[in-house]
């Protein structure tokens, strides 16, 4: 996308400009096709006047050859123009999807604010396709206008009044068509907004289907989706009625206009101002004009819906970033992390020192405080007050993408990919060093995911279902933990990595985690006594601030609140 704030109009213009050569090629071929079609009734009229009326076989043969050439050219141009035009739309939509994906995946964040994943998917598919269609129909519109101009010139040669009637009548018809398309644009925007919301709700419900079944909340979920779906359906029906009314109105206007041309032509023929052949040509041109007018109606409708979709795409592309970019992270960072008076959400002036190479536990009874801490460490948002530092440098001064290659925050609800177990673990390696295989092996052992692999039909090469649903909750957690450990980042933050794992396995993971992360900065945000027991130090967050700190066994003996949080 260009620099500056994207708007709907800018998105449309860029989609067309990006395919300029293809649009021009399709337009030229379309104009040739429409021109040949417009000339067909003219040649037929000339055939009547110069061959049929005079009985000249040679003239008839020549004009029939001309007709054959016209049909050959228009047929070839139509097929080629349609192929180029459709390809233009697909390429424009593909480029928009790439731009949207780049914005959504931008490490500075912000594109997904107040938008469900399903809504973003709808924008990247349906809306991108509709904007791409605009790049396709531009050539159709140019061809239709060319057909009208060629028809007007041909009618001027037949009769000046007929030609002037077409030339003077076309601009008002085009203006009326544009005015009539306004309600369609507004209703299309509402339809697309409701459809995207319905897709988002559906994706949200499908993701949490197991939880909903476990809670017995299926009926409430169905009622929620039914309401959302009905809203989407109502908006779609209003848009469909608007499109039907738009096309009907345009068809009625063009029908009246063509009828007027036919009546005027008939009157001129009876008056002797034009010949029989000219009358046939005029009537044929009048009937032919219905095609370009219908094409313009279709183009108008596509433009109306394309403008609505372009506006929605522009809103995503113009989403303000959550964090600003900075400079690159220095090579070979030590991994010393510190929070200095950090306030964000439920955090209130948090001071926390995480020395390089340390294994620190963080206990937060308030889930919101735990989440806000993760957000700060991952730099998904910058603190309202205070600063988070890496080796003495504020995170706000570092590039977020480079930072996440150093600091990995593994959230509790991390998803798995529809791939093999081994590929899921390798996903964290990125541009992995040569010791990638060894890193994966150690990660599998430390997370006890090697046990999961042994239980699967094809071991670590077993293909997992979408989001890893073919595994149990504990198995998914172990594979997700293996992926985080295999990445081998200088700083690793884990949030409740063993909540679905049995106590024996959890103890093994605790020991393996300490070993595999030796001399690497690690933070465990958890209330698991097995994990907290292997940490160097535990920090307790209460009411958004650090309330206590010490070794796990010391806190268990001296702090009743800590004891209740950990042993509950």
Image (tube, rainbow, N blue to C red):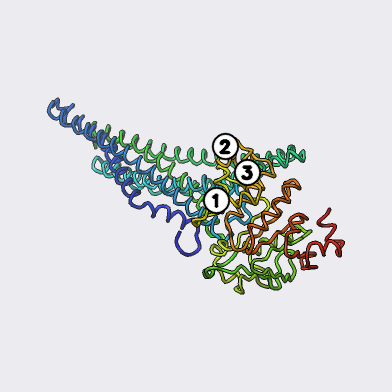
Question: What kind of element bears circle 2?
Answer: loop
Which one is in front, 282 or 357?
357
Distance in Å between CA atoms under marks 1 and 3: 24 Å
- Which residue appears at 54% of the width and 47% of the height? 183
Residue 23's disc number: none
Return the x and y of residue 90 as percentages of the image width and height. Answer: 42, 45
Question: What kind of element bears circle 3?
Answer: helix
Direction bottom: furthest residue? 392
- Which residue appears at 15% of the width and 28% of the height? 61
User: Few, some or many C-alpha atoms within 10 Å of disc 1 (few <14, some 14-19, many ≥20)?
Assistant: some
Of labels 1 and 3, the one closer to you: 1
User: Few, some or many C-alpha atoms within 10 Å of disc 3 (few <14, some 14-19, many ≥20)?
Assistant: some
User: Few, some or many C-alpha atoms within 10 Å of disc 2 (few <14, some 14-19, many ≥20)?
Assistant: few
User: In the rendered image, which residue does mark 3 sit on?
Assistant: 203
Q: Are marks 1 and 2 in contact (CB under 8 Å)?
A: no
Residue 427's disc number: 1
Of labels 1 and 2, the one closer to you: 2
Q: Who comes first in sequence, dot 1 or dot 2?
A: 1
Which one is in front, 367 or 36?
367
- Image vertical order of residue 271 relative to residue 29, above or below: above
User: In the rendered image, which residue does mark 2 sit on?
Assistant: 458
Q: Quadrant of the N terminus?
A: bottom left
- Which residue appears at 49% of the width and 56% of the height? 434
Of labels 2 and 3, the one closer to you: 2
Return the x and y of residue 296 as percentages of the image width and height. Answer: 41, 43
Q: Who comes first in sequence, dot 2 or dot 3?
A: 3
Which one is in front, 165 or 115?
115
Distance in Å between CA atoms under marks 1 and 2: 19 Å
Return the x and y of residue 39 as percentages of the image width and height. Answer: 26, 37
């Amino acid at each position: 996308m260009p620099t500056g704030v994207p708007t709907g109009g800018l998105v449309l213009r860029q989609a067309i400009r990006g395919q300029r050569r293809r649009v021009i090629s399709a337009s030229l071929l379309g104009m040739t096709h429409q021109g040949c079609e417009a000339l067909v009734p003219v040649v037929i009229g000339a055939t009547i006047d110069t061959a049929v009326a005079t009985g000249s076989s040679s003239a008839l043969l020549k004009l029939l050859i001309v007709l054959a050439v016209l049909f050959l050219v228009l047929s070839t141009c139509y097929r080629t123009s349609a192929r180029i035009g459709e390809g233009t739309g697909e390429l424009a939509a593909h480029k928009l999807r790439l731009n949207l994906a780049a914005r959504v995946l931008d490490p500075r964040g912000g594109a997904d604010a107040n938008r469900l994943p399903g809504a973003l998917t709808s924008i990247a598919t349906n809306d991108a396709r509709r904007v791409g269609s605009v790049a396709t129909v531009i050539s159709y519109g140019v061809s239709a206008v060319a057909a009208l101009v060629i028809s007007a010139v041909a009618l001027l040669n037949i009769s000046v009044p007929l030609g002037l009637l077409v030339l003077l009548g076309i601009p008002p018809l085009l203006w009326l068509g544009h005015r009539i398309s306004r309600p369609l644009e507004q209703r299309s925007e509402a339809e697309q907004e409701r459809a995207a919301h319905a897709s988002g709700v559906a994706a949200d419900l499908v993701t949490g289907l197991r939880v909903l079944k476990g809670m017995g909340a299926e009926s409430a979920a169905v009622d929620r989706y039914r309401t959302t779906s009905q809203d989407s359906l109502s908006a779609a029906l209003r848009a469909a009625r608007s499109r039907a009314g738009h096309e009907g109105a345009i068809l009625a206007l063009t029908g009246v206009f063509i009828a007027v041309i036919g009546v005027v032509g008939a009157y001129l023929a009876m008056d002797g101002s034009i010949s029989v052949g000219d009358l046939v040509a005029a009537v044929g041109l009048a009937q032919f004009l219905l095609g370009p007018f219908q094409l313009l109606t279709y183009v108008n409708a596509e433009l109306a819906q394309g403008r609505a979709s372009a506006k929605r795409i522009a809103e995503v592309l113009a989403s303000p970033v959550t964090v600003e970019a900075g400079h690159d992270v220095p090579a070979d960072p030590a991994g010393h992390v510190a929070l200095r008076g950090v306030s964000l959400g439920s955090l209130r002036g948090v001071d926390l020192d995480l020395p390089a190479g340390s294994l620190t536990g963080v206990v937060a009874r308030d889930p919101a405080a735990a989440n806000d801490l993760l957000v700060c460490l991952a730099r998904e948002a910058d603190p309202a007050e205070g600063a988070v530092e890496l080796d003495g440098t504020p995170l706000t001064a570092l590039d977020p993408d480079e930072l996440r290659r150093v600091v990995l925050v593994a959230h509790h609800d991390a998803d798995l990919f529809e791939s093999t177990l081994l590929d899921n673990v390798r996903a964290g390696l990125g541009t992995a060093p040569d010791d990638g295989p060894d890193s994966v092996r150690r990660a599998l052992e430390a997370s006890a995911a090697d046990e999961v692999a042994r239980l699967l039909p094809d071991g670590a090469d077993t293909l997992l279902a979408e989001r890893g649903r073919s595994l149990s909750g504990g198995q998914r957690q172990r594979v997700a933990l293996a992926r985080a450990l295999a990445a081998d980042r200088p700083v690793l933050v884990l949030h409740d990595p063993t909540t679905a794992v049995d106590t024996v396995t959890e103890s093994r993971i605790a020991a393996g985690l300490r070993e595999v992360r030796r001399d690497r900065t690690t933070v465990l945000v958890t209330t698991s006594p097995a994990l907290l027991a292997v940490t160097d130090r535990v920090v307790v967050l209460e009411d958004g601030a650090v309330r206590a700190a010490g070794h796990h066994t010391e806190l268990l003996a001296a702090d009743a609140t800590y004891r209740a949080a950990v042993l509950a």
